[in-house]
Image: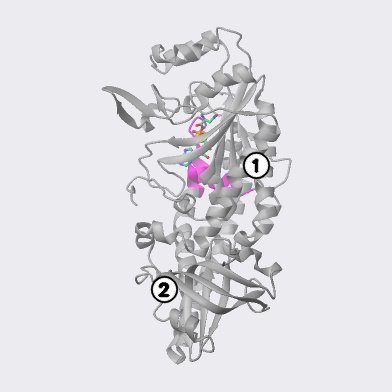
Amino acid sequence: MRSFVEIQALKDLVGQEVWLRGWVRAIRSSGKIRFVELRDGTGSCQCIVEAGEPEAFAALEGCGQESSVCLGGVVREEPRSPGGVELAVSAAEVVQAGEEFPIARKEHGIEFLMQHRHLWLRSPRQTAILKIRHRIIQAARDFFDQQGFTLIDTPIFQPGAAEGAGTLFEVDYFGNPAFLAQTGQLYLETAAMALGKVYCFGPTFRAEKSKTRRHLTEFWMIEPEVAFYELKDLEGLSEAFICHLVQAVLTHNRAELEALGRDCAALEAVGMPFPRMTYSEAVGMLHDPELHGKLEAELAAEQERYAKLQKRIEEMDAELAGLMKAWKREKLTKEQQALREEAGDLERWLRNQPGHIEDAKRFRWGDDFGGDEETILSRQFDRPLIITEYPREVKAFYMKRNDADPRTVLNLDVLAPEGYGEIIGGSQREDSLEALQARMAEEGMDPAPYEWYLDLRRFGSVPHGGFGLGIERTVSWICGLKHIRETIPFPRMMGRMAP
Ligand code: 4AD
Ligand code: MG
């Protein structure tokens, strides 16, 4: 009987005979020895097959990247190997000798990788992201479960819009139109009136017709909703919630963060309290000459960094021309490629930033913040920023009017730092029947499909509120990614439906 173990358990099994099963990340032979880098989803391990084990050595002949194999042998300490151990192989069995794997070690363009997403998922970078995504989702559920919230599953086929008709996906529901859920919120409010503290977690859909690094057409949202909660309570809940998520990842996923090259110090800085400001104060900040001075100085510093990067890239060209050894050339070429990418991103930023600074100066009270304003605002803080009380014209019909300033509503957006922008949107809900009906009329909404929702304001209405946190935006920020497309196994965006 073979006793199979997981690679993550090997460090405690030094000296023992075990079997591993998994996939060949890389294999190289040098004379009488084969080095197999085996991965099994729990980690990767160097496995040494010597010609002195002729059967095992021969079994692996012609076995290439991503072939599936079982390897048996003794676990040895090896400080130079990533996990501190390696396997001295004495038996090998190829489960399937894979065809030539399309994703080789050389660089591929993003389009190629997206077309091969089903295979790309096996890369160390993608598995690190998937593990952090899992952690965030698990921590999110734990947070609400521990605080006595009840999970409510809200419908995906819905009769109407909750977040604006412009981004609805319409489907044919037995001859009648139905729409894919943009949010579970309206249904969740009904459950909050039944249970007090509830949350929903599921896929949501928005026909976003823009290609940005922050928008998907299918994304996952976790939404709490609480009876008797007011805006201040939501601010506190959102802050405790985000800290819990960041802590969970820092505690359990250091290795994955490091694999992604994430600056952990930036995540460690995320603690309570978060800075808070109203929308009007945020507009004031965008107009503040002190901010403009800071942005201009940053622009100058980045210009200098760009010049240095360019110079280093040119130096590397000269070094490459003189290098003979293939492995040295390969290493330097890779480094140069990474610098080129960094320089390319920086060049784009330098080109756009002067325009963003001008836009900030000219921003008009009453407009919604776009990605560019959010980026500027959230880069000014080392932790998430809570912005409250936006103009009611740019916000959803269900948000409660702010009696202190009726031009605004009692809502909050939470912007992730380092320029990531909005990860949470929420509000206190309009709990007055008359005010809600008036607002719906103003928006030209037919009240008929919403009568059930209006009933909540007829039968024991109470102040209440909640918010939604976008899982993919949060993964993007915590992992430090440049684009949302890597945060979900199979991203759906405008122009991408396959695989
Ligand atoms: O701000 P939003 O639209 O709020 C709602 O849907 C409320 N009904 C939630 C509530 O109060 N219960 O969306 C909430 C969050 C955003 O902050 C963002 O993180 C994410 O959902 N989100 C998206 N993520 C990826 N792609 C998109 N197209 C997204 N649209 C929103
Ligand atoms: Mg929003």
Q: Is residue 379 magenta?
A: yes
Residue identifier under label 1: 242
What's the residue type where badge 1 is placed? Ile
What kind of element bears circle 1? helix
Picture coordinates of residue 270, whole percent (x, y): 69, 48
Residue 67 vertical placement versus 28 (above, below): above
| Mark 1 residue crowding within 10 angstroms, few (<14) / some (14–19) / many (20+) | many
Residue drawn at x 57%, y 23% as measured from the top left: 409
- Nearest the viewer among 331 and 54 is 54
Cβ of mark 1 under 8 A from ligand 1: no
Q: CA distance from mark 1 to mark 2?
A: 37 Å
Q: Quadrant of residue 45?
A: bottom right
Read off the magenta span.
357-380
Q: Give the side of residue 54 with respect to residue 138, left or right.
A: left
Residue identifier under label 2: 106
Residue drawn at x 49%, y 44% as measured from the top left: 371
Residue 19 vertical placement versus 470 (above, below): below
Marks 1 and 2, the one that precedes in the sequence: 2
Q: Between tags 1 and 2, which lies in front?
A: 2
Can I make out residue 112 in this image?
A: yes
| Mark 2 residue crowding within 10 angstroms, few (<14) / some (14–19) / many (20+) | few
Q: Is residue 245 magenta?
A: no
What's the residue type where badge 2 is placed? Lys
Picture coordinates of residue 378, whole percent (x, y): 59, 46
Q: Quadrant of residue 459?
A: top right
Residue 378 vertical placement versus 151 (above, below): below
What kind of element bears circle 2? loop
Picture coordinates of residue 354, whole percent (x, y): 48, 53
Residue drawn at x 57%, y 11% as measured from the top left: 432
Residue 389 vertical placement versus 36 (above, below): above
Q: Give the side of residue 480 with respect to residue 58, left or right.
A: right
